[in-house]
Amino acid sequence: MSITSLPSTRVPLGPLFAADLARHGERVALRTTDEAITYAALDGRVQSVADRLGVGRRLVMITATNTIDFVVNYLGALRGGHVVLLAAGDVAVTASIAERYDPDVVIGPDTAWCIDEQRAATAHDPHPDLALLVSTSGTTGSAKLVRLSSDNLQANAAAIAQYLELTPDDRAMTTLPLQYCYGLSVLNSHMLAGASVVLTELSVVDRCFWDLFAQTSATSFAGVPHTFDLLERVGFEAMSLPTLRYITQAGGRMHPDKVRRFAQLAEGGGWQLFVMYGQTEATARIAYLPPALAASRPGAIGVPVPGGSLTIDSPDGSGVGELVYRGPNVMLGYAEHQADLALGRAVTELRTGDIGRVTPDGLFEIVGRSSRFTKLYGLRIDLDRMEEILARRGVTSMCTAEDEHSVVAAVTSADAAALAQSIVPAEMKVPASAVRVVVLDELPRLANGKPAYLEVRRLAAEQAGHCASREGPPTVSGAFAEVLGVTPGDGDSFVSLGGDSLSYVEMSLRLEASVGDLPRNWHLMPVRDLVARAPAARHRWFARTDSSVVLRAVAIVLVVGTHARLWHLPGGAHTLLVVAGYNFARFQLAAPSMVASIARVAVPSMCWIAVVAALSGKYGWEHALLINGHIGAPESRSGYWFIEALVQILVPLALLLSVPRVRRAERRRPWLFACAVLGLALAIRFDLLLNGDGAANIARPHEVLWLFALGWAASCVTGTRPVIARLALSAVGWFALSGFFNSPSRGLIVFAGLLLVLWVPSLPVPRAATRLVGAVAAASLYIYLSHWQLFPVLERVQGSALAVVGSVVAGIALWSVARRLIALAEARLVPRAP
């Protein structure tokens, strides 16, 4: 239910950044993809929330999301002097915290952002200084919370605004979840400075993130070490970002080599890199490294934030001791039960648990963490040093202590595990039995990108047989592990982890079993958002399936049936070209590299055709090299023309888009770029640029490029007038198909496929048939490859109908074997980055 309390006349108790938003006037405060709200308008909405919450102080639990609704309710509760309990999107964790602390009011997406009043008054007696309860960054999901005051929040925001020199002209992108103290500090400091915050839950690996960055002329974003790994994946160094002023890094230690590399990149790009150190217990920030020192002193955490001080407690002979911080942003203390909300200040200084020292020039350095040491056989073992030693030997690892032994999680291969098993005991002077190595596809991470050492221990226990196996639908992470061979981080998406159109089908079917019907853009969604989705209501008999998946399955069956003379419905292969262009924009363009996805088509095809050529003599070397369409005789341009055309379209596009300037142009204006390629392809189709020889004008790559480009443009239809864009592409498709084929029915089939991907995102498929449809679609390449050899034999023995069924089943079996061989080859040849 909602409450309708009379407006409060009390002086606001919240921090200044929440209490006095109106002073920034008509400047834009918050932006999203399709909305902007000024400070004046935001102030009114915030005051409305404060009024509705009433005069008496209450415990208000708010689910944190990177949305305007969250910001309005968060600032409104602070302005009204209430105690805000931040909750993450995880349903189980939120329920646990709610049960432990019994909030008076609940606000979030589940309540449609309405104020859900659990009781009229309050069941608590919160301390007058208490303003915010938030999980520590290292204990996500724990009921142990950090108690922060309004003064803590205000002091931290003011310090950050000061050393970052924030002005009203700054515009920050939200790359981090706002329930994380680092992400929340970005919001608070910008609200204090009258700057803008661009709210998004997109990852830096998503093309749309950079489109939004350019659209809003953003000047900064924040990152944890994992963010910088992702930036390297997406070719950040080649991006043109003229409005970028600075990037901040916190949330864990980044290797000095990487700090130096990005500092040099910043110097060349005209922006600054701020390396920062902090803890939730200090309301986020403790120290920062001045950008001018990032390249020369990349291993230092720098100097204390304005208003704070750092000391080394009980230093040893070399000046090394525990780092202790004092300042107005130090928390009141921890809360573990409802009764703790009434407590006042319990601490006046923050013992960080980090072991550090001061350099002669006054900079602070961290040399280790007390919790990252363990004792084995009476020896003090530095787990961080263990990781660094392994890294120098080429083993990416995560080391943690468990009971009487250390656990080393080595990724990528069994070879790395064997190397770790030999290095660690020798370096640490402990018996080999004291070291247990587990092999993982990817290092597990928390939502904020930090190492998930608890998850490492859990996975190690599972591999050792300590955890009972669980039955039921695959988890989201389990689906990623099974299909892509990686354990995803919370911020990873299907595309960022290298998923392509070949693995899309299988992944969508597995995820549908976990979370129900999927949104159209699920392949770009971070894993945390997929996990947070409540299972959707399912139709008893039908499941919504991506139309491109259904189209792939139908098209390949049409191809096989036409060739086996079960029916005469040509056009399936050309329809597959439209689908290939559609998926190219969704997967290859958003992926860090196009090489792997092209290789997954070209290499198996070349191998198969080479074997068939050697055994049958029907094909030549030009077929195996996929160039027969250019140098072979016109009468031989049938058979594998589709694969030749597809590969010869993808390779030049990959080379073209490897040029940084071209890639930036495509990222900024994907729709216009696709239309430009379509215009060029249509000029070739109508002989305005190249004159066809009239022999095979529907088979060679440059002659069918327009079909691929049409699918590409269809996938990029976004913006404010998508209906007009779809109508335009429909008209272009009809016009270009007119006269292109000798058979009108072929053109109608291709046009129907185009309309399907343009206008119908998903189709209802009987649940009993979804796996069959998915398998046929996923195996379409292998069905196409093998059916030329299979259907003639099966047709003579069993007739056309069974020839079609047999060819499809055999192609699925070939795909099932091939994908496992490809996964093994990729694991050995292309190790995945953490």
Image (cartoon, rainbow, N blue to C red):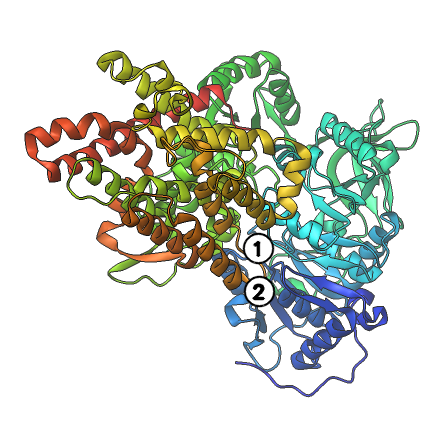
> Is residue 426 shown to the viewer in this render?
yes
Q: Nearer the viewer, residue 494 or 666?
A: 666
Residue pointed to by mark 2:
101
- Mark 2 and mark 1: span between their CA atoms? 9 Å
Q: Residue at the location (78% across, 45% down)?
A: 244
Find disc 1 in the rendering and name its residue.
143
**Residue type, numbered disc 1:** Ala
In the rendered image, residue 763, in percent from the top left (x then y), is placed at 33, 57
**Image quadrant of residue 792?**
top left
Q: Is residue 698 left or right of residue 766?
A: right
Front in this rendered view, residue 761 or 388: 761
Dot 1, crowdedness within 10 Å: few (<14), some or many (≥20)?
many
Mark 2–mark 1 contact, CB under 8 Å? yes
Query: Residue 423's x, y, as percent?
Result: 56, 13
Left or right side of 144 for 277: right
Is 195 in front, or is 154? 195
Considering the numbered disc 1 on the image, is that residue within a helix, a strand or a loop? Answer: loop
For the point 80% across and 59% down, the residue is 195
Return the residue found at the far right.
Answer: 361
The spot of residue 526 in percent (x, y) is 53, 48
Q: Secondary structure at mark 2?
A: helix
Q: Position of residue 350 (x, y in %)?
A: 77, 46
> Residue at the location (32% across, 61% down)?
538
Screen quadrant of the C terminus: top right
